[in-house]
Image: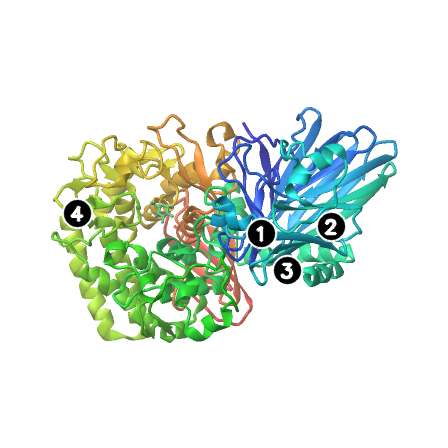
Amino acid sequence: MRYGYFDTENDEYVIDRVDLPTSWTNYLGVEDMCAVVNHTAGGYLFYRSPEYHRITRFRGNAIPMDRPGDYVYIRDREDGDYFSISWQPVGKPLDQAKYVTRHGLSVTTYECDYKGIHATQKMSIPIGDNALIWDVNIRNDSDRVRELDVFTYAEFSFHHVPIDNQNFQMSLYCAGSDYMDGAIIYDLYYEEEGYQYFTANFEPDGYECLRDNFIGTYNTETNPRAVAEGNCTGQVLKGGNHCACLQKSLRLNPGESARLIYFLGEGALSESKEIREKYKDPEALDRAYGELKSFWKKKQEKFMVTSPEDGIDTMINTWTLYQSEINVMFSRFASFIEVGGRTGLGYRDTAQDAMTVIATNPEGCKKRIVELLRALTTSGYGIHLFEPGWFLPEEEKEKKKKPFKSPTVIPEPEGASKVHGLSDACADDALWLVPSITEYVKETGNFEFLSEHYGYADGGDGTVYDHMKRIVTFSLQQVGDNGICKGLRADWNDCLNLGGGESTLVSFLLYRALVCLSELSGFMGYEADKKNYDDELDRLRTFLNDTLWDGAWFIRGITHNGKKIGSSQNKEGRIHLESNAWAVLSGAAKEEKARITLNSIHEHLSTPYGILLNAPAYTEPDDDIGFVTRVYPGLKENSSIFSHPNPWVWSAECTMGNGDRAFEYYRSLCPYYQNDRIEIRHAEPYSYCQFISGRDHTSYGEAHHPFMTGSGGWSYFAVTHYILGIKPGFDELTVDPCIPAAWDSFSVKRNFRGDIFEINVENPAHVQKGVKEIYVDGVRTDRIACPRDGRQHSVRVVMG
Ligand code: GLC
């Protein structure tokens, strides 16, 4: 069953059946302000922090779902009947009204046709503005004059999510509203600059600032008193709960339309006046849409693929790129699942996100990498969850300091307490940063970055290269009794705690980090380091293959009391995905073992919806293994199809030349291919979800937790770098695809260090991997150097 379709021409997903089984999300804004919206205009708005600078309120995990939101109600004065442009909250029966929602790149549009009125509400946050704009168009498609009243509604928040949800003894008396010059001004009194405004490009005929007056104490957003009765009280108040309602009366002749533009923004009266002035001419808003479009177009043009698979083209050129970028921009605690109750950056998630879209967002990825470098301790482990502001150099902190401390001040731990000890360190966290940095220098050619100085979380500073060295030194030292890296608090799998034991995954991640450092030190001419890393790699390769091999795959770990995890000797959790994927992908597994391992993954873990994280599911609690044994079988880390590590396997298959299997796996997880199976998937078909219920759960195939997941980034990275095989090197671009044998050809337009490469890959012999000939600008060559002349170059690659 389908609920919509991909409009590739306009980079939109069009939901033409709005009674979806769950909320389908979009993100508006590309700078400091962000709105998380769903398909029925539910959602919330924040400025910089979803936890500490929330503008509109949201009642997470509630019913009706995803309320409140940004609502526009239209009431016919003749009969008092009213509807909302988005299906919810009024929710007219779907056989009486027609609703469509279009989620695009940083734009969402709600559309409704009801009783001869066609209305649209287009939502966006233009580049350079700190305001959410509601662009409303109402057209009279009937053959009689219509007298309408238009009401808006958004509910203001007390800014700070915790005080929005508990302890109202202060908050209820600290927020006030005012109405001046056509603008509602919302004021969080005890914050010096705690203002927001709601205004429009017209003189309103009425307004309502008090939430309870608008809704009515025993009503809801579905039947708000003001709309049902057709009038606002025009009240303001110091204290209480506030809303953004402007009323406008319209008289529309047949065929006539009206465009009403609303602004929900950060700032006080003067900012509200500025934005009205800026968009006095609605064409200015049309230009702002153009700017947003070209913001995304520029990114899309960095890597544009045309392949025999629409799913790859649509997802890689648009939706997976978009999802990955949104993760880097608003990492990771703003969604309908994480509703702003946590904030900051998770070390491992951010380190991985920052590796995936360097080509399209080098500045954004560098910013994240620097934040992570500053959150590294001198011992070489990362601070697992941190606010980037904590570790800014004093001068930069000073600039950001608020002039006064309010009750909503963002709590900042004192000095040393920001830096947790080894007992809270996750063994994998910082190991992800090493490859991200090498990817960054390969993509940008910015080798000077390696000698830039950044502080350590616990004091002192060092070059970027010095940070990288400390990361691997830490992991080389943190080994357990069996010589395997310790699992510490957890490795990538938060729920596998190994009770103080050892993690094979971390050993393979260390191996990969060492490979990166060996290549980097070699290229930079640091011969002693290079020798040192190569020696470690030789030693580790033998050791890991000898010690961790279980017969048909690699084990996942050893608990503190010597019990093997992920072994054929176990009854449950016999085989795990992460350690086996990285055994191959890191290059540590010897060829025969790599081949057997991938076959075992296929045999034991593959499903029609993607690859299981482990199997069989754990059913008996065992604290030596960890929390994973206390999670329901088939959900989350206990034998679900956890999306994020799936692309590790696609990539590992590609390193071994198995293009058919890599694509089979891609297809099974890729949401695009589930567009017609929404009765099973539930979630949106344009973005990856954190996990899909595994075969041991009654909801097998149902996807959960969309958008804010590393799955998007990893999927983008695996397809571009491994399946299509276009990888930046230190001083070249390599093209080494691993594709389904059936493909005749594909092409990619790739912008690399300022040059544009028009790459055409031909596959006359129908192989899965292997490059026979390369031609650059018609001349046969064996490598694609980077001329950096800012010109277009044709690259012809013949596989065989
Ligand atoms: C969540 C966490 C991530 C972790 C994963 C597996 O996605 O954000 O850090 O690696 O779960 O436990």
Q: Which residue is mark 4?
A: 548
x and y percentages locating residue 388 in the rendered image: 42, 62
User: Helix, strand or loop at disc 1?
Assistant: loop
User: Helix, strand or loop at disc 3?
Assistant: loop
The span from disc 4 to disc 2 (Cα, nearest Å) is 63 Å
Dot 3, crowdedness within 10 Å: few (<14), some or many (≥20)? some
Q: Which residue is mark 1?
A: 55
Evaluate whether residue 323 shows in this view. Answer: no
Label 3 or label 4, whichever comes before in sequence order: 3
Q: Amino acid at mark 1?
A: Ile
x and y percentages locating residue 164 in the rendered image: 51, 47
Q: Which residue is mark 2?
A: 261
The span from disc 1 to disc 2 (Cα, nearest Å) is 19 Å
Q: Which residue is mark 3?
A: 267
* Residue 788 against residue 483 in the figure, above or below: below
Check contact, mark 2 vs mark 3: CB within 8 A.
no
The span from disc 2 to disc 3 (Cα, nearest Å) is 18 Å
Asked which quadrant contains residue 15, the reply is top right
The span from disc 3 to disc 1 (Cα, nearest Å) is 11 Å
Check contact, mark 4 vs mark 2: CB within 8 A.
no
The label on residue 756 is none
Closer to us: mark 4 or mark 2? 2
Label 1 or label 2, whichever comes before in sequence order: 1
